[in-house]
Amino acid sequence: MIPEMDQYKTRQDIPESFKWNLNLMYPTPQDWEADFARVESAIVSVERFKGRLCHSAHTLHEAFEEQSKLDLLIERLYSYAHHLSDEDTRNSENLGRVDRIRSKAADAGARLSWMDPELLEAPMEILKGFHVDPVLVNHARRIELLIRSKPHQRSAEVEEVLSLASEPLGVAYKTFSLLENADMKIPHAKDAEGKEHELNHGSYSACLESSDRVLRKNAFETYFGAYAQYQNTFAATLDAHVKKQIFYAKTRRFQSAIEASLFSDQIPVGVYHGLIDTVHQHLPLLHRWVSLKKRELKLPEMQLYDLFYPMVKPAKVEIPYEQGCKLVAEAVRPLGEDYAKTLESAFHERWIDVFYTPGKRGGAYSGGMYTSKPYILLNHKNNLNSTFTLAHELGHSLHSYYSNRYQPYQTASYPIFLAEVASTTNEMLLHFYLNERADSKEMKLYLLDHLFTQFRGTLYRQVQFAEFERDIHAMAEKGIPLTAQTLSETYAAIQAKFYGPDMVMHDLVKYEWTRIPHFYYNFYVYKYSTSFAAAQYFAKKIFEGDTAVRDLYLDFLKSGSSRDPLETLKKAGVDLRDSKPIEAAFKVFEEALNEFERTR
Ligand SMILES: [Zn+2]
C-alpha cells in the first residue's frame, strides 16, 4: 500500500459516485433485520416436505421452489452484510450481521441436509421421470446431476459414517493453515542498506517485486527457510490431505482421486493430462522468456526471487480512475453495443466501490447475487495495473449480469471452471487496445511485460502446480510414501523442467510445495489455466473483429451453469478435449515475445 496514493482519509470524504450503492439491496439496516426475521419460517416451509419429496413431480417442484426462495433470501442477506462489512472490516456491528447470517445459513444447511439423500434413495426410473417432467423444467439440471451421482451414492449406513468422518478428515488443511498463519514465526529480512523488513504473506511478494536484489534474495531465503524448518509437518499435512482424497475416491467407487475430483465438472481425466502435455511442449517459450529476462535485468544468474521483479519499470503514467473507466469502456467496444452499454451502467448505477480507506478489505473482487447488482470492490490506484484489475472485475460482473438475466436462478451461477474466462477476455481486450495505441517504446514494453507475467503466473505456474498435484496423488495411490524428501524431489524435478537451463535452482526452491494452500483445494488450479487459454482465443478473435465468435461469446456469458462446462465452452467454439485452444494461447505468448524483442 503506497500511502501517498490513497487520496481519501475516510469514507465520508469520498464522493458518492465512487462508492457502491448497497441501498439498492436494502434501503436501511432495519430492512435487513425484517428480512432476517423471515429466514426461520422459510426454513420451516422446506422442512415440511421431509419424507414426501418424491410423492410427485408437483410436490418436488413445490419443495424446490420453497428452497430457492430460502436460498435467495439467505444470499441477499449475506451479500448485503458482507459487502457492508468489507467497507470497514473493523466495524463490529457489520461483523455481527455477517456472523448472524452465516450461522443462520449453516443452520439451514444442516436442517435441510436430508434433501439430496432422500432423492437419491428413490428408484432411478422415478428420478428419470422427474428429469423430463415439464413441471420441473427449471430444476432439470439439478436432477440430472443427482442422477449422475447416484452410482457413487452408498447405503444409508455408509453415508452416515462418511458424514461423521468429514470433520476429523478435514484436519489436514486446518493444521496446515494454523501452522503457517498462527504458529510459524518468520524472521525479518534485511535490504542492501541493512534495513529490516517484516515478512508476512502479503509483504513477502512486495519484497520480491523490489528493485533491491539483496532484499529479494534475503526475503526469499528467510521466507522459504522458515517453511523448510517445518517441512516434515507440512509433508504430514499434505500426505493426510492426499490420503483423504484417495479414501473418498475409493468409498465413492472412483478409479482414482483425480477422476473423483473431475467428476462433478464432467472433465475427462484425459483433458487434465492433455493440458499438462501441451504445456510441456511449449516450455521452450518459457525458457526463452527466462533468458530474455536475465538479459534485460542484466543478472549474473536467474533465481526464483528474480521472477517477480518487472523487466520494464511500470510506465510512469498516471491514469485517474475516470480515465481508466473510459479506457476499459473503449476497449470492450468490439463486444458490441449492449455489452458496452451494460458496462457503462456499472459506473452510473454505482456497482463499484473504488477507493481504499482505512479498514476496507484488501484486494479486489466481483460479488453480488442473483437479484442484486454484480457489485465490485476495488482498492484502486491511479495506474495501469489497477486499470487492468478494473477490466478484470468488470469481466466477472458482466458475466454475472448476463447469466443472471438469461438464466433461471437455479442455473445462473457459473462454475469455477469457467469463472476466469470473462475476466481474462476483458483484460486481453484492454491489452490489445492499449498496445495498438501505445505511443512510446516504454509503454509498449511495459504492456508486453505485464502480459508475460499473466502467462507465467496463470498458464505455466498453475499447470506446474497441477502436475505436482497429479503426481503426488499417483505416488500415494501406488503406495509410495509422501515424505518431505519425496515431495521435495518431485517438486524440484518439475520446477527444473519448467524453467529450463537459465534458471539456477536454489537449494530452498524444492520446499515451495510447503507453502501452496491450493494443494489442499483438490485439483483446482488447472481451471485457471484452461479458463485463461480459452480467453486468449476469444479476445484475439473478438479484437480482430470476428463477429461470429463475438456472438458465440455473448451467448457463453448468458449460459451460467446450464450445461457441463466443457459443453458450454465447446458451444462457444472452444473444445478443450483438443489441444488446439491451448496451442493458440501459446501463439499469443510467442507473438508477444517476438514483439518485445523487436521493440527492444
Ligand atoms: Zn478473477
Image (cartoon, rainbow, N blue to C red):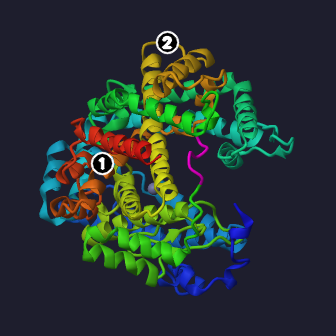
Ligand 1 resides in the quarter of the picture at bottom left
Question: Does 269 appear in magenta?
Answer: no
Name the image quarter holding the N terminus: bottom right
From mark 1 to mark 2, how far is it between C-alphas?
Answer: 36 Å
Viewer-side residue, 503 vs 396: 503
Q: Is residue 74 above or below residue 253?
A: below
Give the main secondary structure, helix, strand or loop, of the magenta stretch.
loop
- Indicate the quadrant where residue 133 lies: bottom left
Would residue 127 appear left or right of 292 to someone viewing this image? Answer: left
Q: Is residue 487 above or below residue 525?
A: above
Residue closest to the far right = 194
Residue flagged by tag 2: what amino acid is it? Ile
Would residue 40 appear left or right of 595 to someone viewing this image? Answer: right
Would residue 361 appear left or right of 62 to someone viewing this image? Answer: right
Would the CB of label 2 be found within 8 Å of ligand 1?
Answer: no
Would residue 481 appear left or right of 407 to someone viewing this image? Answer: right
Residue drawn at (28%, 45%), measured in percent from left and top?
A: 120
Q: Is residue 44 visible?
A: no
Disc 2 target residue: 480
Q: Is residue 43 visible?
A: yes
Q: Nearer the viewer, mark 1 or mark 2?
A: 1
User: Percent from the top left, x then y, of residue 462?
Assistant: 45, 38
Q: Which mark is residue 33?
A: none
Residue drawn at (56%, 62%), measured in percent from left and top?
A: 102
Element class at badge 1: helix
Question: Does 310 appear in magenta?
Answer: yes
Disc 1 target residue: 534
Element class at badge 2: loop
The magenta region covers 308-313
